[in-house]
Image (tube, rainbow, N blue to C red):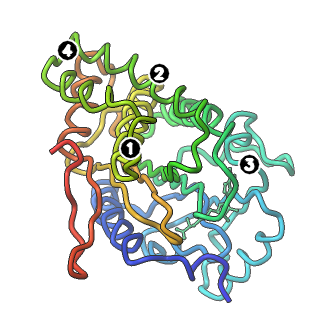
Amino acid sequence: MPYLQAIATDRKKCVRQLDTNIIKTELKAKDKKLKYFGLPGPDMVDCLTWKEYLQEIIAVEIEDKYIPYMFNTACLHKIEGILTVLYGDIDEIILSGQDKNGIKIDPLLPFNLVNLDYEGPLSTALGAAYSKRLEALRKLVMMQTEKKVESWLLFVTYNISPYRWREEYVEKLFETASKVIDEIRRYNVNIYTSLKQKLNYPYYNTSSLEEKVELLTLALSVVVLNTVLKAGKFEIDLDNSFVVTYEGGFNAKMCHIALRLIRCEVLDTPTQYSQICELITKKTFKLEKHNSELSLKPILG
Ligand SMILES: C[S@@+](CC[C@H](N)C(=O)[O-])C[C@H]1O[C@@H](n2cnc3c(N)ncnc32)[C@H](O)[C@@H]1O
């Protein structure tokens, strides 16, 4: 029985299809297959779905028991020749520059497709991982900048089921998001007002799960986008980027941020904030299902 395939939902498949469209754009721009870096897990469903677009797979796995299983999966699908597995916590590996076996990541850079698909709905609580994840993300963007990669794709998925977020981390997230939003005010008062109105709604005063998920999505998106844009020299290809919140297996609420990043010399602060605003207002959705039809609904609509 596959470890994770059983929890793949029609919504996750839909999100993966949206990712695939972006991958095709990147492939066309590059005219070359992509080097993947990420967390495929033992069943490697993402890598298998995108197999025809990949020339190399650098997989990271924290659970040593999954690693042989991963090679089995790769052999079964004839991709073992392009697979390297690093062992350890991906954030630690990015921050320290090597995995638990001493394999260095610098020679493996740059990556064309990074899929930080950290969590299935069953893994442990997010808790302390939050700040380390942001730090690792910052470092990754800096490393990609140093390697002068022309463009690349960054997919990040977080479990935002409200019960998984301890109060102190929710507070920290909203505090950071609030600082970014206050900065946005200087550049775009309209967006500032709609974000502020929405995010001023006290998280712990609402018992609505939907409201909580929306608030977490907006705050997380603001923080992640700001981290990415501040860390390196990339702008967001808005036509090929989006944020979507969807229901994963076991009713887990997931937030998926997909960005196509393009190298630029300097991205001034007004442009950074206007890109964040554009993405949040026009490309941040919740995936809804009505009468067995899936549709994307803007969160700040
Ligand atoms: C959600 S699954 C991957 C699913 C896969 N990307 C897909 O699309 O089907 C995440 C995998 O990464 C591993 N993992 C989770 N957090 C990790 C971390 N911080 N560092 C390394 N591996 C991690 C898990 O053990 C699991 O095998």
Mark 3: which amino acid? Asp
Instruction: Identify the residue position indicated by label 2 in the image.
Output: 175
Q: Earlier in the sequence, mark 1 or mark 3?
A: 3
Above or below for 253 versus 193: below
Amino acid under disc 4: Tyr
Q: Which mark is residue 89?
A: 3
Disc 4 marks which residue? 187
**Residue at the disc numbered 1:** 217
* Eye-nearest disc, 1 or 3: 1
Q: Is residue 106 visible?
A: no
* Three-letter code, disc 2: Glu
Q: Is mark 2 within 8 Å of ligand 1?
A: no
- The residues bearing labels 2 and 3 have C-alpha atoms spaced at a distance of 27 Å
Q: Nearer the viewer, mark 2 or mark 3?
A: 2
Element class at badge 3: loop
Mark 1 and mark 2 lie on one chain; the one further toward the N terminus is: 2
- Residue type at tag 1: Thr
Residue 269 in sight in this render: yes
Q: Mark 4 to mark 2: distance in Å?
A: 20 Å
Report the residue at 75% width, 78% height from top.
69
Q: Is mark 4 within 8 Å of ligand 1?
A: no
Q: Residues within 10 Å of mark 4 (few under 14, many from 20)?
A: some
In this rendering, the label closer to the viewer, 4 or 1: 1
Does the Cβ of the disc 3 residue fall within 8 Å of ligand 1?
A: yes
Instruction: Name the side, left or right, on which 277 lies relative to 135.
Output: left
Looking at the image, is mark 3 or mark 4 earlier in the sequence?
A: 3
| N-terminal-most mark, 4 or 1 | 4
